Amino acid sequence: MMTTAPLLEEILQPAREANDSLFAQTGIRPEYAIVLGSGIQIFEDLEQATTVPFSSIKNFPQASVKGHKGEVSVGYYQGKAVALFRGRLHRYDGHPWRNVVFPITLMKEMGVKKLILTNSAGGLHPYLTPGDLVLIREHIYFQQVEAEEQKALYLMGGARQHQRYCPEMMQQVQDAALETEVGLKHGTYAGLLGPTYETHAELKFFRNMGAALVGMSTVPEAMWAMALGLDVLGISCVTNVTHMIEALAGTSHQEVVEVAQVASVKLERLLKRLLEKQ
């Protein structure tokens, strides 16, 4: 334990410097943070908002996936301070775990207490259609775990805690869905490495494991955020269905982005109501 303890300082110190850099440009310390998945466009109307490119934040790794702007907007929605991360970092883009979760570490230093992770995902079951919003109840971690990730989670108490998505926020978002008449399904999300889309055999395998959704992000971020003590909520936007061979054959990143943009209207209505309930 003593020999690995400095690892946390190595992870946290760059985020502290990034927080100082970001705060100097925004002057706001947000309590809420939202990470946007591919093609998702919401909360363009934050009040007193300042938008900062990742490249202008000290130590921030760069995102390069299409559909991810690579910027953070900090402002207010009905008096609540919110940080909106338009873009995320993926392992399939060559980023190590430390980079992938850097935005989460930064959020902790910013003072964020509640995190909403969104993503674009493939729907594994016939009851899911493109444009559906799905509450992530649980996840399946199907990415190779790096030694540094294992050590960091252990040092943060990972061996002693049961990580789970925030029950209170899950209930609140379900109530918000009823109040706004936004359809919200639920299921288990399988987080894969990517960048290629899954084979039909792999999809059948994950369905048999109990997964309803499949994607290439979210899980490492969620686990690290939980370890850091943030309340975490996860919502997937179904951008393509993978239970039909013909649909699978036609899947493209452009399709994912386009469907996510259309579904953004529903997602924004839902999340605005959720924040109003806080």
Image (cartoon, rainbow, N blue to C red):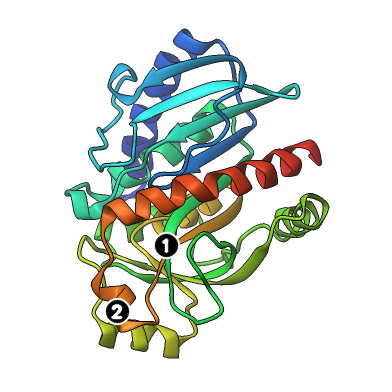
| Whole-percent x, y for residue 86 in the image | 42, 34
| Whole-percent x, y for residue 99 in the image | 29, 42
The residue identified by callout 2 is 246
The residue identified by callout 1 is 121
Examine the rendered structure and indicate whether residue 160 appears above or below residue 248: above
- In the image, what residue type sits under mark 1? Ala
Q: Nearer the viewer, residue 138 or 154?
A: 138
Q: Secondary structure at mark 2?
A: helix
- Say which quarter of the image contains residue 253: bottom left
Specify whether 16 is left or right of 165.
left
Specify whether 276 is left or right of 214.
right
- Say which quarter of the image contains residue 83: top right
- In the image, what residue type sits under mark 2? Glu
- Residue at point 21%, 55% (across, down): 92
Gap between marks 1 and 2 measured at Cα = 17 Å
**Res. 230 visible in picture:** no
Examine the rendered structure and indicate whether residue 22 appears above or below residue 183: above
Q: Secondary structure at mark 1?
A: strand
Specify whether 190 is left or right of 178.
left
- Which residue appears farthest toward the bottom when viewing the image? 208
Which label lies toward us, 1 or 2?
2
- Residue at point 24%, 74% (across, down): 249
